[in-house]
Image (cartoon, rainbow, N blue to C red):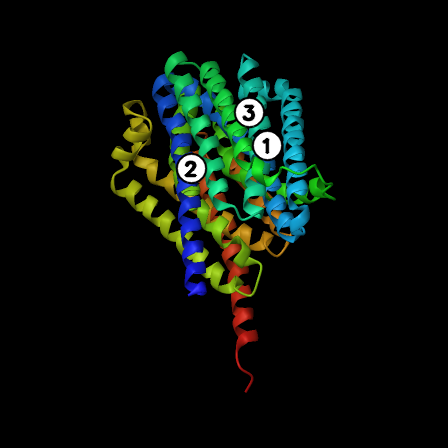
Amino acid sequence: MARVTGRRAILSHTVLVAAALGVGQVLSYAVSVVAARALGPEQFGILAALLGIILIGSVLALGIQAVAARRLVHIPEADRSGSSHEILRQGLVGGVAVAAATALITPVLMWVLRLDAWLPLLLAALTFIPLTWAGAQYGVAQGRESYRRLAAIYVAVGVGRGIGGVTGALLSQSVVGTMLGLTAGTFVGAIVGRWVVAPLAHAPSLRVEKFFSESAHATHALLALFVLTNIDVLLARALLTPFEAGEYGVGAIIAKVAFWLPQFVGVVLFPRFADQRRAQATVIALAAVGGMGAAVLAVTAIAPSLVVNFVGGAAYDDLIPIAWMFAAIGALFALAQALLLTRLAVDDRRAVFAVWGAAIALVLLAVIVMPRTVAGLASSALLAGALLTLVGVGVAGAELRGARRRSAPTP
């Protein structure tokens, strides 16, 4: 009976976390969908580039979350509250550091993205403070196996960010107003999240050795993935006309749906990637992620006009013939992410080189090989994603075959 109850608890926690992540993702897409209509193609192209910068910069939050969860599992129960307090403090410090570093390179980003104003970039930099702080909160709740609190924090940050961004876009119909609302809403969400996680970190701080160095290793791998999955939006701003960059930004929303939809699969199965259940968990993860990606691709291929009009409106009808490409890009990147997680679970630091290689290939294809059009840039991302996925599947397949040989009975 206890075993059944445990299985039911795992299932309920999975559903709870998946639903909470879904709320945040839907609201994140809502910001892009509303802004695409309220700002118009040229202004939305700028916003899409800023959102890409935020996604890349927020990778430290994911690295901190992963290390925090892993470390807290192995810390004695009596010290977990104090360690959690220290992790939350270091998460806030890390957020301030990322924000300051981004602010320092604002002139470079203005030149690369062809922006005339620095204020939108400053607001994007400020957003890193609550995002990184929230990453520490996720890690504390996850490491303490408090899934209800973890789900509550996901919802708080997602709702704050989503409502802030949508309100800013509707009221101002400008990039600055949208970013101001998004930044303020994210701060509110992180403050609520700190209140939610407070009972898990009520003791005085205890030093957590090498926390930032371990976070740096995890962040490096995740940064490579985030660069790969977002650099095409930045390239669109640099290589395409302002109108085409806006079109590509809308197509990128479709890709992000396919990419983020199966995110909860990795969250749930990551511990299984690191123990004797690794082979089975890998197969399940690839099947689940691949199935969700195929579903998004099928819907987009069957009803491209419906998808494009829902995401961006009639102003983006030129995307209809190639909408399926963006769905395929997101599906391939999602598979690549699942494969990367299977390598991170066994501390395989070589995997990061394959991801960086795919990112470099995307840039070279877009700048040198492919035509500088929306379809040309999408083709570059599609080929890079396919290359990385094939490499990852090859490595996983070889590992699974080796595991089968080792487990086969000896004659």
Q: Residues within 10 Å of mark 2 (few under 14, many from 20)?
A: many
Q: Residues within 10 Å of mark 1 (few under 14, many from 20)?
A: many
Q: Which of 35 and 242 is in front in this view?
A: 35
Task: Please name which of the two marks, 3 or 1, marks the residue nearer to the observer.
Answer: 1
Say what amino acid the circle numbered 3 marks. Answer: Thr
Name the secondary structure under disc 2.
helix
| Mark sitting on residue 127 | 3
Name the secondary structure under disc 3.
helix
**Residue at left offset 43%, top offset 50%:** 14
Q: Is residue 337 above or below residue 397?
A: above
First in sequence: mark 3 or mark 2? 3
Task: Please name which of the two marks, 1 or 2, marks the residue nearer to the observer.
Answer: 1
Q: Nearer the viewer, residue 378 or 212?
A: 212
| x then y, percent, for residue 236 | 47, 28
Left or right: 108 with respect to 333?
right
First in sequence: mark 1 or mark 2? 1
Q: Is residue 281 above or below residue 87?
A: below
Q: Distance between the residues labelled 3 and 1?
A: 10 Å
Residue wearing tag 1: 133
Viewport quadrant of the N terminus: bottom left
Task: Please name which of the two marks, 3 or 2, marks the residue nearer to the observer.
Answer: 3
Say what amino acid the circle numbered 1 marks. Answer: Trp
Q: In which quarter of the image is residue 377?
A: top left
Q: Nearer the viewer, residue 286 or 354?
A: 286
Name the secondary structure under disc 1.
helix
Q: How far apart are marks 3 and 2 (CA)?
A: 20 Å
Q: Is residue 15 above or below residue 134?
A: below
**Residue at left offset 45%, top offset 26%:** 160
Q: In this view, does 306 lie above or below 339?
A: above
Residue 33 seen from this side: yes
Residue wearing tag 2: 256
